[in-house]
Amino acid sequence: MLERPPLSLYIHIPWCEHKCPYCDFNSHEASSPLPESEYVNALLEDFKYEYSRLEDLDVELISIFIGGGTPSLFSGESYKYLLEEINLKLPFSNKIEITLEVNPGTAEAGRFISYREAGINRLSIGVQSFDNNCLKQLERIHSAEQAFNAIKTATSAGFTNFNIDLMHGLPGQTIDQALNDLQNVIDRRPTHISWYQLTIEPNTKFYRKTPILPVEPVLKNIQDEGHKLLESSGYKQYEVSAYATETYASIHNKNYWSFGDYLGIGAGAHGKLSLISEAKLIRTRKLRRPDHYTSALNDRTAELIEIPSGQIALEFLMNALRLKDGFSRRQFETRTGLSLDEITKGVESLVNRGLMQRTSVEGQLFISTTPKGYLFLNNVIGEFL
Ligand SMILES: C[S@@+](CC[C@H](N)C(=O)[O-])C[C@H]1O[C@@H](n2cnc3c(N)ncnc32)[C@H](O)[C@@H]1O
Ligand code: SF4
């Protein structure tokens, strides 16, 4: 039976100083000055609209993620106003995680302090690499020195909980360079590291003119050695690209991957909601163009779809199996509204091939991939297609 899962909020800020050649996020080069206050008002109107979809108005928000784009182009005052207005409508859990993505090229000390005053308690710093040559190829607007300084500024402003985004498999990158980047991140002791292999996405400059990337054996070597380095340095992998120290796995990421609910506001933002009274799950997407989004009135939804019942189990698995710990029977049944029997045949077959495992923790059945299955996640998911 479908039950209401925890609720998060995603807020999208769609502008950047420069569009990076590998990026397919909904981000647009900023024309100055940015329509900051108009956009914040549009976000609040959008939030009120999303709020009207909620069936339980006492539900607490467990996390807010302000992503982009480059959210650090906006001031702390704007976020303070935004968060206060949101909190007038929805209570925040007393352990709420509120993350803001920061680009080291837009990192001023004063801003970081005002972000903390606004209630933001976690930063995600987009370092990507500490190698100036790589940064140049990625057309990042910051240098290695600015990246080191942004981390120092974040910690001096009192952010003890912060993530660093790092990419690997970069044009011309060797195994030593990739491990050196990783060691530099580890030495800064963030609570969380997102370590992404560069992918070439359609509709990007790199897709039209792809740079020479490391060959497959080098990529595999980087992946294997990097993973070992992270784990031996106290960073435990909990999702395909996410590593964290002890209790610092991101609440927002985990809710997203375990098929929790999230409202999505801002240009192009996605949301997912369980409508218990109608026994259905919906996905929403907002107008993509920042100007259309800002000037629209009330409803900025570009698309609203009900997840077809025949696809719910697959969507759940595509998300939850990215988590190393997998999922419990209860999570599967309450978040999909289906019985575990729906997937038993596939699970059985994967268990027999050593790709999946069933464990019991305090009487609760958990299902996850084995270490071997985690390496072949696409094959595992393919079993349920
Ligand atoms: C939405 S971006 C936001 C961060 C911020 N805009 C920045 O770039 O500093 C989130 C992260 O996704 C990663 N990313 C973006 N495009 C990628 C790609 N094509 N391949 C791998 N990782 C990518 C980068 O590490 C980036 O920091
Ligand atoms: S700064 Fe981030 S969001 Fe903006 S273009 Fe670059 S990778 Fe994309």
Image (spheres, helix red, strand yellow):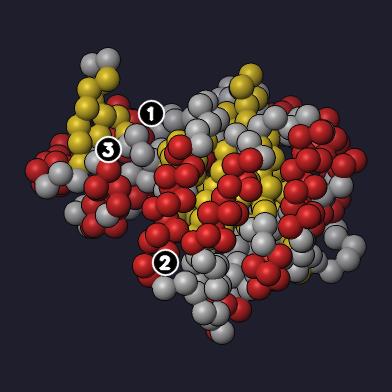
Q: Residue 368 carries which label?
A: 3
The Cα–Cα distance between marks 3 and 2, rounded to whole angstroms, is 29 Å
Nearer to us in this view, 172 or 239? 172
Label 3, ligand 1: CB separation under 8 Å: no
Q: Are marks 3 and 2 in contact (CB under 8 Å)?
A: no
Q: In this view, does 147 lie above or below 249?
A: below
x then y, percent, for residue 344: 14, 40
* Secondary structure state at the residue bearing disc 2: helix
Query: What mark, if any, has residue 213 been given in the picture?
Result: none
| Left or right of residue 106: residue 194 | left
Q: Name the residue under label 2.
A: 218
Residue located 59% across and 42% down the image? 186
Tell me how many marks there are: 3
Q: Is residue 12 above or below residue 111?
A: below
Report the residue at 32% width, 37% height from top: 326
Could you say which disc has been placed on residue 3 in the image? 1
The answer to which quarter of the image holds residue 88 is top right
Query: x%, y% of residue 114?
Result: 86, 36
